[in-house]
Image: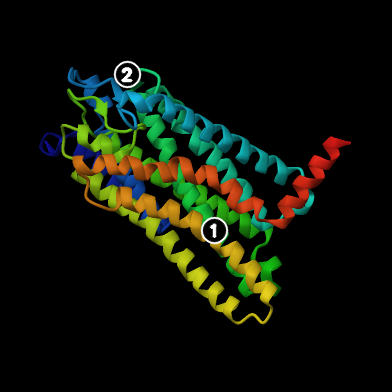
Amino acid sequence: MVKEFVGPGWTSLLSSLYIYHTWERRYGGKIWVFLFLTFSFCAHRSPLRRMARGNSSFVTEFILAGLTNLPDLQLPLFCLFLVMYVVTVLGNLGLINLIGFNSHLHTPMYFFLLNLSFIDLCYSSVFTHKMLINFTSKKNIISYRGCMTQLYFFCYFAISEAYVLTSMAYDRYVAICNPLLYNVAMSPKVCSILMLGSYLMAFSGAVAHTGCMLRLTFCDTNTINHYLCDILPLFQLSCTSTYVNELVVFIVLSINVIVPTVTIFVSYGFILSSILHMSSTEGRSKAFSTCSSHIIAVSLFFGSCAFMYLKPSSAGSMDEGKISSIFYTNTVPLMNPFIYSLRNKDVKLALGKILSRKQF
């Protein structure tokens, strides 16, 4: 009788509430339990289940509209983004190998930089090949499962990058403000915990976004007004209510943008205060150079993400959103190897040694 009244979706939610009560008493992890409840409820009401019950209106594939439909711009944009991707791959792979094979670069700062390069390499590879297809074919088709998979990894690597940038800001704070305690505060164990926390936050955020996207039904329209399977363009195609999804997006994105941003600003507030109290002009110049590079990358990444997601969605603003998304999907992974390495003396020295060995 209860099942007939509340329906299978709410029965699943009641079961999840029982598990919530058990986990809350045992572990007390409110955030993790919230994400568990969100995913279990959203996944239970996914269109895959409705399709199994005979929903013939379910969309099995999408068409990615791409960045632009102007014929004169297709070839130039294809060449531009192909070159950007090749440089991104070579730059990040080169930085990973450089840090990995040089023992004097095995420090906390370069440990985070190696992880950042790995994330950028994977991040740019999630969507670039489909983006390039848009410039060379009339229809760029992606399956429903492929679209959800792309969405998951896109969210995963984007959130990972946010927290790695935050860890790098904390590393610079300790190095400048508490140099005597640097080896203790940034021990290998602490660095590993920071990276593990970054990947766990990325996993939970990606699961929440993808799980809630699975609850939506896509009926007749299947053209995504974007060059990747992003959250907001998919909302516009849904023929069911997206209120719950928008609430989850606002909560998860607020946590993953506001928390890292506040942490970074607080860290650099202390850094700026310490720099202003330095007596050495050379020390000030070096500290300002390191901070300015990081702040530029952080501003590009977080600024474009906030502009894309932390505002009301509308059809008119989607084209602007595609332009802003280029910064955090293409420009940031391209720039990171340069702004974090080419201005660093240790990396230049390691690169010079490798080049001199090849000459002889």
Report whether 92 appears left or right of 32.
right
Answer whether residue 171 is visible to the viewer in this image: no
Residue at image coords 35%, 48%: 35
The local secondary structure at tag 1 comes to: helix
The N terminus - image quarter:
top left
Report whether 238 appears left or right of 125.
left
Q: Residue furthest front?
A: 72
Image location (x, y in percent) of residue 280: 69, 78
The residue closer to the viewer here, 52 or 250, is: 250
Q: Which mark is residue 170?
A: none
Amino acid type assigned to the residue bearing label 1 in the image: His
Residue at image coords 25%, 39%: 12
Report whether 291 appears left or right of 214.
right
Q: Residue furthest right?
A: 360
The residue closer to the viewer here, 317 or 160, is: 317
Label 2 Cα crowd, 10 Å radius (few <14 / some 14-19 / many 20+): some
Q: Which residue is mark 2?
A: 139
The C terminus - image quarter:
top right
Amino acid type assigned to the residue bearing label 2 in the image: Lys
The residue closer to the viewer here, 118 or 351, is: 351
Answer whether residue 297 is visible to the viewer in this image: yes
Residue at image coords 22%, 46%: 313
Image location (x, y in percent) of residue 130: 42, 26
- Distance (Cα) linking label 1 and label 2: 39 Å
Q: How is the image coloured?
A: rainbow
Image location (x, y in percent) of residue 184: 68, 67
The local secondary structure at tag 2 comes to: loop
